[in-house]
Amino acid sequence: MNPRLEPALTLLGRILLSLIFILSAGGKIADWPGTAGYMASKGMVAIPVLLTLAIVFELGGGLSVLLGFKARWGALALIIFLITASVIFHNFWAYTGAEKQTQMVHFLKNLSIMGGLLLVVARGAGKPSLDARRKTK
């Protein structure tokens, strides 16, 4: 690996990894009633509290990874969010046919994202990041 490329690739990786969470949080905010209805269809209770927590985890964790500010903690929060969301919303084992395949793809996509987030937990945000800036001061 060319050492000059590493900072740019690390930043691009963090951007791509965080984008799904930031956009998803924005979608939940923009369509609160629709998201709440979907959560209700899955049998969830205390929807205003849980929906607020989902937005906080996605937006807070997503921005943390994107900016590289306390990125390990942000990535860990997103992993916790993904485990919960995967089990509740992408429980492919409860479906048959095409829907089972669709939900399994979403479940596996979430596992893949967790893999990327585990790399952030293990290695940190890298450079350039706010975490790296604080270490040099």
Image (cartoon, rainbow, N blue to C red):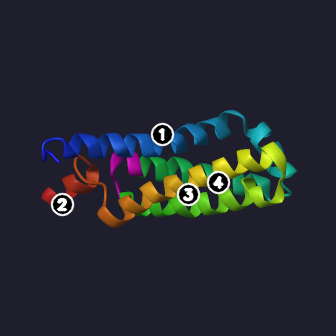
* First of labels 2, 1 by sequence position: 1
Badge 1 crowding class, 10 Å Cα cut-off, few under 14, some 14 to 19, many 20 or more, is some
* First of labels 2, 3 by sequence position: 3
Q: Write the start and end of the magenta stretch as one range.
A: 65-70
Classify residue 122 as left or right of residue 117. Answer: left
User: CB atoms at circles 2 and 4 under 8 Å apart?
Assistant: no
User: CB atoms at circles 4 and 3 under 8 Å apart?
Assistant: yes
The residue beneath circle 4 is 107
Magenta-span inclusion, residue 92: no
Is label 2 or label 3 in front? 3
Q: Position of residue 75 (x, y in %)?
A: 45, 58
In the displayed structure, 118 sits above or below 127; it is below
| Residue 74 appears in the figure | no
Is label 3 or label 1 in front? 3
* Residue at point 75%, 52% (across, down): 48
User: CB atoms at circles 2 and 1 under 8 Å apart?
Assistant: no
Circle 4: element type: helix
Classify residue 40 as left or right of residue 15. Answer: right
* First of labels 3, 1 by sequence position: 1
* First of labels 1, 4 by sequence position: 1
The residue beneath circle 3 is 111
The residue beneath circle 2 is 135
Q: Quadrant of the C terminus?
A: bottom left
User: CB atoms at circles 2 and 3 under 8 Å apart?
Assistant: no
Circle 2: element type: helix
Circle 1: element type: helix
Is label 1 or label 4 in front? 4
- The amino acid sitting under disc 4 is Phe
How far separated are the C-alphas under marks 4 and 3? Answer: 6 Å
